[in-house]
Amino acid sequence: MSDATAANPMPAAAPARGKTSLYTQDALTRRRNAAEARFKMYGLVAIVVSLLVLAVMLFTIFRDGTSAFRQATIAFPITLEAETLDPAGARNPEDLAKVTTIGYGNLIGRQFANYLTAEGIVVDGISDKDISGMISRDAPGRLRDMVLADPSLIGQTIDFSAYATGRIDGYLKGRVTLDTAELDSNVSVEQLQLADILTERGILSIAFNMGFLTNPDASDQRPESAGLGIAIIGSLYMMMLVLIFTLPVGVAASIYLEEFAPKNKLTDLIEVNISNLAAVPSIVFGILGLAIFINFAGLPQSSSLVGALVISLMTLPTIIIATRAAIRAVPPSIRDAALGVGASKMQTVFHHVLPLAMPGILTGTILGLASALGETAPLLLIGMVAFVTNYPAGPLDGGVMDPATALPVQVYSWASRSDPAFIERSSGAIIVLLAFLVIMNVAAILLRRRFERRW
Amino acid sequence: MIGTQEMVSWSLMEMQMTLVKITLSTVAVLAGTTGLALARDNVQVTGSSTVLPYATIVAEAFGENFDFPTPVVEGGGSGAGRAKMCEGVGENTVDIANSSSRISQKDLDTCAANGVTEVMEVRFGYDGIVFASDVAGPSFGFTPADIYNAVAEQVVKDGALVANPHTQWSDFNANLPAQEILVLVPGTKHGTREVFDTKVVIAGCEETGAMAAFVAAGMDEDGAEEACMKLRTDGRSIDIDGDYTETLARLDADKNAVGVFGLSFYQNNTDKLQVATMSGVTPSTETIATGEYPVSRPLYFYVKLAHMDVIPGLKEYVEFFVSNDMAGPDGPLAQYGLVSDPELAATQAMVAARTPMGPLE
């Protein structure tokens, strides 16, 4: 306001009646200008606030989650003693399978302790249990699989690399310290001292963890070996199937409703219902899916096929609405021109309208898929919020019928585990999920840019 | 006019029918081309989220050591799990329901009505419930009476029932620190809440004489128990409907709080939590196994016997679960925080004989 007065070159001219100047603002103009300035401010504040919230969210996720992509491993030579692993000595697969992971676990612990003694690495007051407790419980299972796959390894000394347990891993990442270790019943100070020496000697090292993207889920006792492998496959299968189910049905329904359907009460009813369906809470589709696809149609529980069917039902209205908007955006002059030169209605639609509407349809579909990717609630009821550690088979071998999970499900189930190492993994899983969403949204933008026609 | 309307609705119905047929045949074709019968080859387990970590540990070890696929284990709650198991017999129904409380007659009736007649009840161990506070704060030694005095809606003060006036722990027990009362209690949908109510709140109600006062005020026994279990609503007792990670986060935000946790959760977070004694006993797998520490509950899983020998691996999984290698005192479940069942041998014999459970006493 003071600006307005200062900008006025002739304050003395104010009493002049009847004359208005562009330089002098009357009260009404000032109010209008002030209102506009306020409105701009509100908008700016709203944007700043939402950006701040987004920044805080991304910051916490990346702060907590990036470390999930790195993992400490312990590498040491291990002698696969024949007397432990094959007491019968005949290399008979049945006999070999009788030695359980408990036997392999003892072997690994013993060999690791022996190796440390041979290398002259000693920490006062450390027990053998502490030493073997630094190696992940996932190692015996992997070693057993290696031996069963190739029995000729028995008797040899091989270089073995195992994950370090979640607490040791946390120590290298700064999550666990000597102070917390004193209070922590799952790790001892001696173990951390040993970890320091092992890091110096290069036996214990931290590197990029491919396993986080490829391993299956793991139980609460071995957070270090838990990965997103099955969740990523499950999400991929579901997205592919959702695309296959929804795109043809959605596009066909939209074309029919927009171009062919007579305008009457029935089509009005259908239209209203499609809009209503888009607003139905997703959990309702889960209940429906359980009743129809599992209990009635007899499809297998926890499978990505059922997940995809349920999510398709949920995404279909969104796709239909987006597609109809895209078709409606094609100018009528195009249709008129096509019909004018003698094209049939169907030729008009498929040769002219649909190609022009395609960028909009694809964008709508991809955005629909992206929102479906983050959906957990409907999966809860069809058994996909589960602990699954067997990879589903390939898509052509019936893999869509095998149990699987999905990315958001993994975020949810890790966030509720008791071991703090899972919190890190949960944030890491969010990062992967965000990466998927960004890729899909960028694809939507690129498609629109590439094919969009303006007139 | 009426005729056309009928025609329209009829053709609409026909359209719907064709649609359903098309959808179903698409699904069928999909199933056919993938060359896969719908036979299930993995065990399906669902139920209590308290039992979930134990079940996943067993499932993982089972998958590693047996030729069967790893069982699929779901959480979701004891009640929901038992209801799912009682849905019927067949490959589309689950094989095992994990449960942190005993099955109810209502569940058994539902089961029977749906053809699930033979259910085997397997008790595989005990779970301790502990009170814990921030590791940097003062330490606590509770009795059930202290907890009752802190969280109940009505307490006995100077011989009369009054609305709970206590604001600090030291208000009613000079041995407790002068710290604001804030107790994070598991929500009513949790199995843990039942144990909290029966083993702590009602015990405390009796100890403080509030129970007697309720009865003296003209209530019958059930009414008095109900009155005991009513918690104060002035914000000093907060129901946590999420899981223990939420309780921990709340406790982190307000260092004055005392939270209710499972023993295994506490054991995995000893760097953040310190545990309170109950009637002078420190909770541990040993004190719970001997029964010295009073707040514990048995953990169960229920097996649909009709699925034995039909679902591959079910028999082996159940036997493996109760084996000494898993549920024994030195097994991985005990390391995670399960209190091993002293009568595990009897359970193993029962599993081997596949004895269905009798009617509830």
Image (cartoon, rainbow, N blue to C red):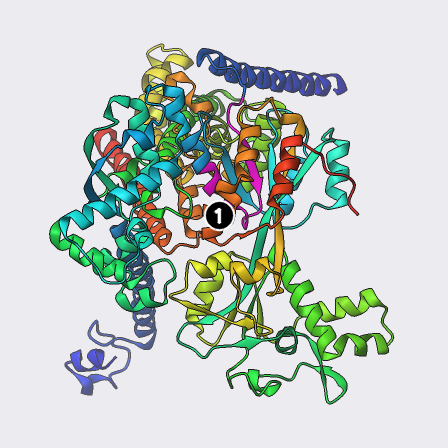
Q: Is residue A365 highlighted in magenta?
A: no
Q: Residues within 10 Å of mark 1 (few under 14, many from 20)?
A: many
Give the left or right position of residue A408, taking residue A275 as reference.
left
Q: Chain of mark 1?
A: B
Residue B225 image point, x, y percent? 77, 67
Q: Is residue B49 highlighted in magenta?
A: yes
Give the left or right position of residue A324, taking residue A49 as reference.
right
**Above-or-below relation of A369 to A346:** below
In the image, the segment drawn in magenta is B40-60
Residue B208 image point, x, y percent? 71, 79
On-image quarter of the N terminus of chain A:
bottom left
Residue B153 image point, x, y percent? 68, 75
On-image quarter of the C terminus of chain A:
top left
What is the three-letter code of the residue carrying label 1? Leu
Q: Nearer the viewer, residue B89 or A333?
A: B89
**Above-or-below relation of B66 to B13:** below
**Residue drawn 56% across and 82% down?**
B169
Residue B254 image point, x, y percent? 45, 73
**Above-or-below relation of A376 to A254:** below
Residue A349 visible within the image: no
Q: Check the image and name the residue furthest to the bottom.
A: B158
**Residue drawn 71% across and 21% down?**
B5
Numbered disc total: 1
Q: Which residue is mark 1?
A: B333
**Above-or-below relation of A213 to A16:** above
**Residue drawn 60% across and 21% down?**
B310
Give the left or right position of residue B109, taking residue A101 as reference.
right
